[in-house]
Amino acid sequence: MYDRMIKFFNDNDHFAKENGMVITHLEEGASEAVMTASERHFNGAGIIMGGALFTLSDFAFAAAIHTFGFRAVGMNTSTAFLKPGKGVPGAKFTARAKVVSKTRRTAVFDVNVYDDQERLLTHSVMTGFITEAPLFED
């Protein structure tokens, strides 16, 4: 089932796809997403734009919350930007999401983004609402 979910997110999240992001791992309540940097991700200071790192976090969160089998939407996010990401084409950035609390309709995740040297760049706490609609109809 997780292989099907990975394919679903990588094929259908057009914003993530256009920005070089892919889901690389899923398990119940957890995910990993990777972004390969290009010049489109750099801000005026020559580092990775905070919005790119946030989007990577959000993509990992979205995939992780859907591992419970139902469609879900984000409700709230708090993000701390801890270190800058180096603006080097081809650099890899990895977001890892893990559930810390889940009820029938909500889930809270810790989502961390690391550079290719495993330095922690951002930490987010993301909360989502889990609907009654299944992710897949079959």
Image: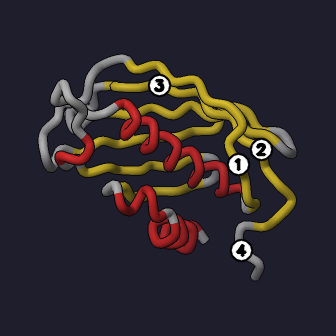
Query: Rounded to the nearest whole Å, what is the CA distance between mark 3 and mark 1?
Result: 20 Å
Which element is circle 1 on? strand
Camera-near label (3 vs 1) is 1
Task: Name the front one of labels 4 and 1.
Answer: 1
The local crowd at label 3, few if under 14, some if 14 to 19, many if 20 or more residues have their Cα within 10 Å, is many
Kindly indicate whether the residue at mark 2 contacts the one at mark 3 (C-beta within 8 angstroms).
no
Q: Are marks 2 and 1 in contact (CB under 8 Å)?
A: yes
Residue under label 2, please give it.
129
Q: Earlier in the sequence, mark 3 or mark 2?
A: 3
Residue type indicated by callout 4: Phe
Count neighbours of disc 4 (C-alpha within 10 A) and say few if under 14, some if 14 to 19, many if 20 or more. Answer: few
Crowd class of label 2 (few under 14; some 14 to 19; many from 20; radius 10 Å): some
Q: Earlier in the sequence, mark 3 or mark 1?
A: 1
Please name the residue that numbered disc 3 is placed on: 123
Q: How far is the residue under mark 3 from the one under mark 2?
A: 20 Å
* Secondary structure of the residue carrying numbered label 2: strand
Q: Which residue corresponds to the image point at 18% horizontal and 24% vertical from the top-left? A: 45
Image coordinates for residue 52, horizontal then vertical, percent: 37, 40
Question: What's the residue at 47%, 25% (across, down)?
Answer: 123
Relative to residue 6, is residue 40 drawn left or right? left
**Residue that appears at 50% across and 49% down:** 59
Percent position of residue 60, x then y? 50, 47
Sequence-wise, which precedes: disc 4 or disc 1?
1
Q: At numbered mark 3, what does the secondary structure look like: helix, strand or loop? A: strand
Quadrant in which residue 2 is drawn? bottom right
Relative to 17, is 69 on the left or the right?
right
* Inter-mark Cα distance, 2 to 1: 5 Å
> Do the residues bearing badges 3 and 4 touch, measured as CB atoms within 8 Å?
no
The residue sitting at 17% across, 46% down in the picture is 39
